[in-house]
Image (spheres, grey):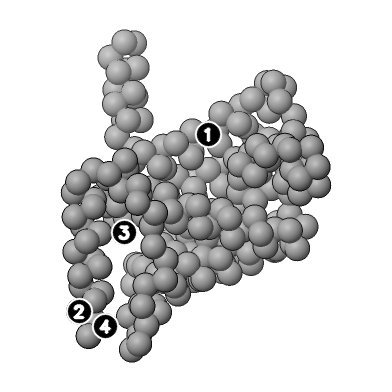
Amino acid sequence: MTAMVLSLTQEYLQIPVVTRTYTTACVLTTAAVQLQVISPFQLYFNPELIISRYQIWRLITSFLFFGSLGFGFLFNIIFLYRYCRMLEEDSFRGRTADFVFMFLFGGIFITLLGLFADIIFLGQAFIVMLVYVWSKRNPLIPVNFFGLLSFQAPFLPWALMGCSLLLGNSVAADLLGIAVGHVYYFLEDVFPNRPGGRKLLTTPELRVMFDGPEGRDHHLLQEEQQERRDL
């Protein structure tokens, strides 16, 4: 029993830090609701309560709850864990600060647009944003969608939206995630590589905290390469 616990602990600690933190927060939030420690009414996105009653925590908790335990929760957690981890281990390997900045960019943008979208829980939109960025950075990877459909990665966000339609759910969160994901992808990957383009998204100077000296050196190398392209 002790060996099993140690093995599970080691497996858990091998999960990249950002993916581990976000996924754990979502699971613990759902568990707290199931145990009636907290209520969903204390978590949802409500601009009026945030501004007038200073319930600032709603800016975070609205991204952590995906409904009670069931198919919807498992569906979202699986996609969150899978695509968040693949992004962190591939595109953002050794660049934790950049990944955290992407989280902040996506979270703030989704929150601002959420003011007009009438969505009270923003986590699904955030997951779709992660899936969209992953799919655009891995366009040639084939995806098997629950053993029913096979297609190239860029179609995956749209397949998720189609799944929402089939389940009779609103697609507002999916469209919101796709829109924010596309903005991030365009500003980070497309525009800087166009003639006359330049990098508009700059990670705040927190690299030593998240990545150490190696992450800072990697960032300086990227900046040097960008300057050479501009010339």
Residue at 53%, 43% in the rendered image: 77
**Element carrying mark 1:** helix
Tags 3 and 4 touching, CB below 8 Å: no
Q: Quadrant of residue 168?
A: bottom right
Secondary structure, mark 3, is: loop
| Label located before the other in sequence (1 or 3) | 1
Identify the disc placed on residue 25: 1
* Crowd band around label 3 with a 10 angstrom C-alpha radius: few (<14), some (14–19), many (20+): some
Q: Is residue 160 visible?
A: no
Check disc 2 and report the residue beneath it. 228
In space, the residues marked 3 and 4 are separated at their CA atoms by: 23 Å
Residue underneath mark 3? 91
Q: Is residue 103 left or right of residue 91?
A: right
Task: Tell me which corner region of the image, top left, top right, bottom left or bottom right, holds residue 53.
Answer: top right
Give the distance between the C-alpha atoms of the residues marked 4 and 1, in whole angstroms: 41 Å
Name the mark nearer the viewer: 3 or 4: 4
Q: Hey, what amino acid is under mark 4?
A: Asp
Q: Are marks 1 and 3 in contact (CB under 8 Å)?
A: no
Mark 3 or mark 2: which is in front? 2
Residue picked out by circle 4: 230
Above or below, 19 against 95 in this view is: above
Secondary structure at badge 4 equals helix
Instruction: Give the left or right position of residue 204, taking residue 118 as reference.
Output: left
Report x, y in % for residue 66: 64, 42
Q: Is residue 71 above or below residue 200?
A: above
Q: CA distance from mark 2 to mark 1?
A: 41 Å
Q: Residue 33, position in %: x, y?
A: 68, 28
Label 4: how many residues lie within 10 Å, few (<14), some (14-19) or many (20+)?
A: some
* Residue 174 in the figure: left or right of residue 82: right
